[in-house]
Image (cartoon, rainbow, N blue to C red):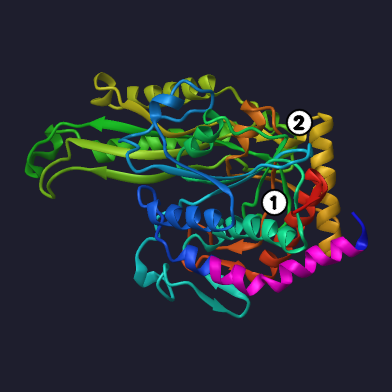
Amino acid sequence: MDDKLQSAILKAVDDRFDAEVEFLSELTAHPSTRGNEQSAQDFMAGELAGRGYEVDRWQIDVADIRDMPGFSPVIGNYDDAVNVVGAHRARGSGRSLILNGHIDVVPEGPHDMWDTPPYQPRVDDGWMYGRGAGDMKAGLAANLFALDALKATGHQPAGDVFYQSVVEEECTGNGALACLQRGYRADAALIPEPFAESLVMAQVGVIWFQVHLKGLPVHVAYAGTGSNAIEAAVPLISALHALEHRWNAADRRPADYAHMDHALNLNIGKIEGGDWTSSVPAWCVFDVRMGVFPGQDMAKARAEIEEVLRQAARDNDFLRNNQPEIVYHGFQAEGYALSQDKSETAARAIGALEAAHGAVTGGTLDKLAITATTDARFFGLYADTPALVYGPRAEAIHGFNERVELESIRRTTQSIALFIADWCGLETL
């Protein structure tokens, strides 16, 4: 790409940046928690159609994806789970690309703990605040406006590009999986998750499960004759934390995580139990999230978790004969390491992103391993497609006062635009 065209692309992003910020604000105003993504997806479909893309909007059918590698079990139905893909079909034969992002956001928590309402986005001192502004609606905006910038210079990608707005990233990843089932394939994928303009070289996997405990209810006056299901959860949680410690041992860490003492995190995210304050609780359910390393065998990991819980239950007089029930739902996500992809395609994709990032920032592209999961695993593990995770700087994602830095969005959009131009090549409109 010559310097004149590169400068024109960067300027085109700058010229449309106010519109990009406005777009992000409108998208963030949609409260697209799981099951409530439809209005945001309607907005996305309209924006893609208005730009002339071939729009595919469909409801995910679990039966279509249940037997595919990477599927995560769900509780409930998918009557309201809708994906949107906008396709650009090129005339030329450039390399193809998936631009993937997720529309779903995590629950916002008590609104009185936010400085301003989470779905009334505001800009303050160079940051946009709002639930999902960073994770990851800014990435969806960057992908779209990078394509807009190319069009503004009189060009379009010379390879097919599939712009994906998917659901379910925050709990299963089945939205991205449904795109694979739908037939969307490309030579590379780019996912602008908010990791501060760094390239993610490795990500952990995640296992979600519930532990169901039964107790023996009696009046609290005779508590000693009953069995408290909530209190029985405490030693089981302690046993799981001991397992977490063992899995993080130095001799179990792959190379990408050798420098991290505690890459795998266990979280007790939810607990419920009992029916009445003055009755010994007869039941308890707690929800667990556990990380796994790339390459860690998922079946063996689940078996180890189950054995740890069974052993801890044997130390409880009541649970010894009333073993906990373990229910897997949500993430059954393998870890993924782009660093392990030694293909020429991966090397070229990484090189193209390094060049684009350097042209925009004047610096080298930082590379990191993260302790979270993304939808990159579907492309990298199950579609033989190198998946590059690279997005803007955000803070307090999943927390109160989530925010994303506007200038970082601008740079990310410029880098993505240059990456598309290099990776796909360009053809005139």
Residue found at x 34% / y 32%: 211
Q: What residue does disc 1 label?
A: 390
Q: Earlier in the sequence, mark 1 or mark 2?
A: 2
Disc 1 secondary structure class: loop
Image quarter in which the C terminus is found: bottom right
Judge the density around disc 2: few (<14), some (14-19), many (≥20) Cα neighbours within 10 Å.
few
Most foreground residue, 383 or 270: 383
Image quarter hosting the N terminus: bottom right
Q: Is residue 369 shown in magenta?
A: no
Q: Residue at x 51, y 65 (%)?
A: 402
The residue segment tinted magenta is: 4-23
Observer able to see residue 412: no
Q: Residue furthest bottom?
A: 125
Say what amino acid the circle numbered 1 marks. Answer: Tyr
Please tell me whether residue 8 belongs to the stretch shown in magenta.
yes
Q: Is residue 404 left or right of residue 174?
A: right
Q: Is 381 placed above or below 424 here?
A: above
> Which residue appears at 35% of the width and 37% of the height?
78
Q: Who's the residue at 70% across and 67% down the image?
A: 410
Taking the image as shown, residue 4 lies to the left or right of residue 124, namely right
Residue 51 as seen in the image, left or right of residue 29: right
Q: Nearer the viewer, residue 330 or 425?
A: 425
Residue 426 spot, x, y in % from top left: 80, 49
